[in-house]
Image (spheres, rainbow, N blue to C red):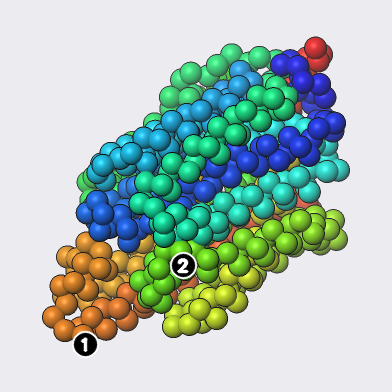
Amino acid sequence: MTATVADTSAAPTRHPQRWLILGVICLAQLTVLLDNTVLNVAIPSLTTSVGASTADIQWMINAYSLVQSGLLLTAGSASDRYGRKKMLAAGLALFGIGSLAAGLSQSAGQLIAARAGMGVGGALLMTTTLAVVVQIFDDEERVKAIGLWATVNSLGFAAGPLIGGLMLDHFWWGAIFLVNIPVAALGLVAVLALVPESKNPLGDRPDLLGALLSTVGMTGVVYAIISGPGHGWTSAHVLVSAAVGLVFLAAFARWELSVPYPMLDMNFFRNQKFTGAVAGSILVAFGMGGSLFLLTQHLQFVLGYGPLEAGLRTAPLALSVIVLNVAGVGARLLPKLGTPKTIAVGMAANAAGLAAIALLGREHYSGMLLGLVVMGAGIAVSMPAMANTLMGAIPPEKAGVGAGVNGTLAEFGNGLGVAVLGAVLNSRFAALVPSVVGAASLPAALAAAGDDAERSRISDAFASGLETSQLVGAAAVLAGGLLAAALLARAERGDGGGEGAQAPAPQAAPAA
């Protein structure tokens, strides 16, 4: 594979600088992922500094996901058509500008708007990083490369609270966004110097209507999910948004089946390996995204740790993933167990870790520590296998779209997890302490308490709500892993159209 813009053959080959390029890609990816989680640890600070309510906090977290999830498919298609290097560089630049605006925000509304702007850059970054990995590694090394890429994903999710806690311990809350700027600048320079350009050699015509339909559809559905806890799941506000989103997604699917150059070939969904990875990824992201949202509140509101202390206590999750992936544990297990069993074992461990946090970590960190280490082991084993399965079901020249699908599932699942598990927490909390139903947050409820006994009762109710929500997340992760494993096993047996159901790849044009 050469570094020319016309280059993307049907079978990717090893690029001579592939491992150095992987490091650059991981740096860009880390920038986005840190922003997904660094805000979690700032929840108490934002509650007091800008007067943010629970609804404001959820919007600060989800505004980014809302925009990003709406644009991921479009961004992936654009990277395939116009060049993955160009889109990666553009994403880093936009993300850096958005981070500056977020860091200088003076109100909850300004911060929500800045986070939405960062989502545009994040969409470009999320789709191009994985697409480039697929292009520069061949089949033999791709699982290991995706394992290291997934390690950075896990590092971003786990290190966000740590970095956020460190920043908040010494600076004001805006610093958690300004720290993105030098990282984005360094990544931009490295991308321009090292990453080879690649794109679909056929130069498919842009699917503008498909881009519009998918963006509106995903935005409508995710907006309904985010709005559900605040407005009520049966409210007109939520139902109308969901209905609009689903209608546009149905129109998108119909259009993609008829257009000569579809942005997303719907025939991919006939491949049970693809659908297995899709189903599993949504439920895994649901459990992980929502549980991490709850974890930082557990550490600070229930166990009483400060922001830095809470961040430090999430580090074992990242360390476990890093050690096992660098050691290549997942890459070695995959050929021995096969993809279905690898995913099932990994996600069972992940679910067990979440359950341990809920049941053993309510009063002491030692039980939570056990859960974090077990979770890390599960992530290291399962996530590379799942990502490799999804990307392997899509032709290499459509790698950007494939990465867009992968990113869309992660963002959709994360947003759904924060919304639904947050709703479970609020419902349980309100049921146990009816007198504080109208409180905007736990600190507000504690401030309104009349005496120490009532404050203790409120804290216990919040801890019980967290436990229930975390167990729901664990069940979702386990269900996702088992469902993905079952579908993949069926596909490998050749039942139900798993064999040969993948859409044929277009003939590649000669490389320049």
Point 36% across, 61% down: residue: 422
Q: Residues within 10 Å of mark 2 (few under 14, many from 20)?
A: many
Q: Secondary structure at mark 1?
A: helix
Give percent across and percent down for residue 238.
28, 47
406 over 317 or under it: above or below: above
Q: Nearer the viewer, mark 2 or mark 1?
A: 2
Q: Which residue is mark 2?
A: 310
Which of the pair 422/48 is nearer the observer?
48
405 over 341 or under it: above or below: above
Q: Which residue is the extreme one toward the bottom?
A: 453
Which quadrant does the N terminus fall into? top right
Point 69% across, 32% down: residue: 132
Which of the pair 221/436 is nearer the observer?
436
Residue 256 is drawn in which quadrant? top right
Q: Secondary structure at mark 2?
A: helix
Point 78% across, 48% down: residue: 144
Give percent across and percent down for residue 51.
22, 54
Q: Which residue is mark 1?
A: 453
Residue 344 in sight from this viewpoint: no
Give percent across and percent down for residue 499.
77, 43
Residue 444 in sight from this viewpoint: yes
What's the residue type where badge 1 is placed?
A: Ala
Which quadrant does the C terminus fall into? top right
Which of the pair 290/50 is nearer the observer?
50
Point 76% across, 56% down: residue: 326
Q: Sequence-wise, which precedes: disc 2 or disc 1? A: 2
Give percent across and percent down for residue 26.
65, 42
